Structure formats: structure tokens, C-alpha cells
Amino acid sequence: MILEKIEALKVEVANMTAKNASEADELYVKHLSKKGDITLLMQDFRNVPADQKKEVGMKINELKQMCIARINELKEQTEVQESGDEAIDLTRTAYPIELGSRHPLTIVKNEIIDIFQRMGFTLADGPEVEDDLHVFTKMNFAADHPARDMQDTFFVEQSKLNDVTKNILLRSHTSSVQARVMDASQPPIRVICPGRVFRNEAITARAHCFFHQIEGLYIDKNVSFTDLKQVMLTFAREMFGPETSIRLRPSYFPFTEPSAEMDISCHICGGKGCGFCKHTGWVEILGCGMVDPNVLELCGIDSTKYSGYAFGLGVERITNLKYQVSDLRMFSENYTPFLKEFENAY
Ligand SMILES: [Zn+2]
């Protein structure tokens, strides 16, 4: 009699289902509570003959364990359903996709921008595909200047040789952005123009057909070379450390007069001379000068009233100085072990 009850309950327990947690709780009350049918089996157990007690006792215990296990299983299932989504697996590793890192050129570009922004410069942007008017003509390049040659500049369209607005090219410097800013506004002007520029060069460890520039322009009343020098010194010290010295050497650019190349004291040897600075104690870093009055006039600014300075630096050049990357091509090869080295740079 009791063995039949146990067998019947085993079948019932094996087929138990629950739609939610409270139904699972009801099953517990029905079978395992003080008045549950499995608990009540113990009353019948008293009447079992002594020689069968061991076998029956084991079967009741087996049934009880089976029932507990089944109810726990049903509870787990209903909890997953009630959490709304079976696909959520809280034991999975967080972020299985590796995050990338900033490109070294972006790190250095942002650092340069940050320094000049703290000195009151704002950002200006312009197109990479430009016309001759903004890249060369307004920048005071002579009609026969070699930069206008196909060998130096990538022309997209060169249909009318004499119409500077019809000759379309990939800008060879970001000075075209300065031209656009001067065209569109009157002094005081204080901008920096970061961007990619293109030149028809063979790709080697030291030259590439594209690179990144940041040019700066400041135009106002009574701007002098002294202002330029102080801004350049502040930039060099912010970028390379407070001990840095600068030196300006006379140079020539079509758009500035006077013009200068700027060197900084070698930050590797502190100016004593080493292999990096070719034992001179100085490394070249940028070009600068006072904006040529012709450029101001060509861009609609009264050169008798206003003066200004401009400077231009290569982001790759500064990055090389800071991180000593020996081969320029590394920046554009997308070689992840190289890029990973900058993971901890900010
Ligand atoms: Zn040195």
C-alpha cells in the first residue's frame, strides 16, 4: 500500500510544472510542508512491518530528495523567466571586445591644441580639396612658384591655367584655412588650424605624401615679432618642459616677412649635443614669421591698420621629437603592436 503511494508520488513529482515562483512555492506546501503528502507518509511508515522498514524508509527519503531537487529546479527556471531575458548571462566576462587606443598623432595634436587654446586661440577648419586661390594666390605665391608644379602638388583639376579658382588641388598646407578665416572675418583674429595636408613626395622613412599640420594666425593692432617669440617660447616650454630654450633662424616663406625657422634645445641631451640632435644641441621644430602685408591685403584686411604673425608646425615632427618614432611610415601602417605602445599615453 505504502509502496504504491510512493510510486504514484514519484510520477507526480517528476511531472511537476510551475509557471512562476508562487506556483513553485505551492508545490512545496503540497508535498513537503508539515501537512504535505510526503511528510504524511511518515505516519503510514509507523505501520510498516519491521522487516520492510529499511527498504520503505530509503524509498521515502529518495522521494523527498527528488521532490526538493525538482522544486529548486522549477524555482530557478521561473526566476530566469521573470528576469525578462534568458539571454542575459551574468557570468560572462565584461567587455569581451578590446577597446582601442588613441593614435599617437591624435594624442600629440590634442596636446598642441590644448596649449594654444589656453593662450586664447580658437579652432578653425577648412576643406582638404581646395582651389589655387586659397592655397597659393592669397598666400602670396608667385605665379611661377614651384609649389604650383604638378611635381610637388596633387592637382585634382587643372583645366584653366590662368583661372586660380578653377584649378582644384589637395591642399599642400593648412594656410588655406587662414585665408578663409581672413576672408570671412575682420581682426582681432586668433586661430589655429589643424588638418591633413598632401604633397607629391616619394614615401620614405622621412617623407610621406600626406602629413598633419597645425598652423596658427594672430592678427590685431600693434602685433609685433616680440609677441610671436613669446608665444613660441611658451608653447615650446609647455610641450617639451620648462627648461626648454628656443632659437630663431632667418628663413623665407612667401606668406611671411620676416620669416624664421625655430629650433628648440635638444630635450634628450639638454643642449649638450648627442646623436639625436646631430651634436648641435638644437632640433628644428617649426616655421613662423610676421604675416606679409600682401597676404593681409589679398584677404581683405587693411595692412596699414593691422599686423600679425603666423606659424606652422608638423604634428608628425613633434610626435617624433616626443616619442622618437624613427620611421614616419609607422603612423599610417595600422600596425597594432606599434599603436598599443601608446595605450597609456593620454
Ligand atoms: Zn641632443
Image (spheres, helix red, strand yellow):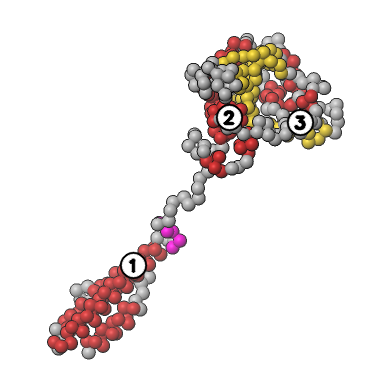
Q: Main structural element of the magenta stretch: helix, strand or loop?
A: loop
Q: Secondary structure at mark 3?
A: loop
* Residue 343 located within the stretch drawn in magenta: no
Q: Secondary structure at mark 1?
A: helix
Three-letter code, disc 1: Lys
Q: Is mark 1 within 8 Å of ligand 1?
A: no
Which of the marked residues, 2 or 1, is nearer the chain's N terminus? Answer: 1
Q: Between marks 3 and 1, how big is the CA–CA gap?
A: 73 Å
Q: Give the residues drawn in magenta, as a range.
A: 86-90
Three-letter code, disc 2: Asn
Q: Residues within 10 Å of mark 1 (few under 14, many from 20)?
A: many
Q: In this rendering, which labeled residue sits more in front, label 2 or label 1? A: 2
**Residue tagged by mark 3?**
153
Q: Is residue 345 left or right of residue 22?
A: right
Decide which of 23, 164 is in the foreground and name it.
164
Q: Evaluate whether residue 319 shows in this view.
A: no
Q: Which mark is residue 320?
A: 2
Q: Position of residue 187 (x, y in %)?
A: 65, 17
Q: Secondary structure at mark 2?
A: helix
Three-letter code, disc 3: Thr
Q: Are marks 3 and 2 in contact (CB under 8 Å)?
A: no
The residue located at (36%, 72%) in the rendering is 18
Q: Between marks 3 and 2, how big is the CA–CA gap?
A: 24 Å
Q: Which mark is residue 75?
A: 1
How many circles with numbers are drawn on the protein?
3
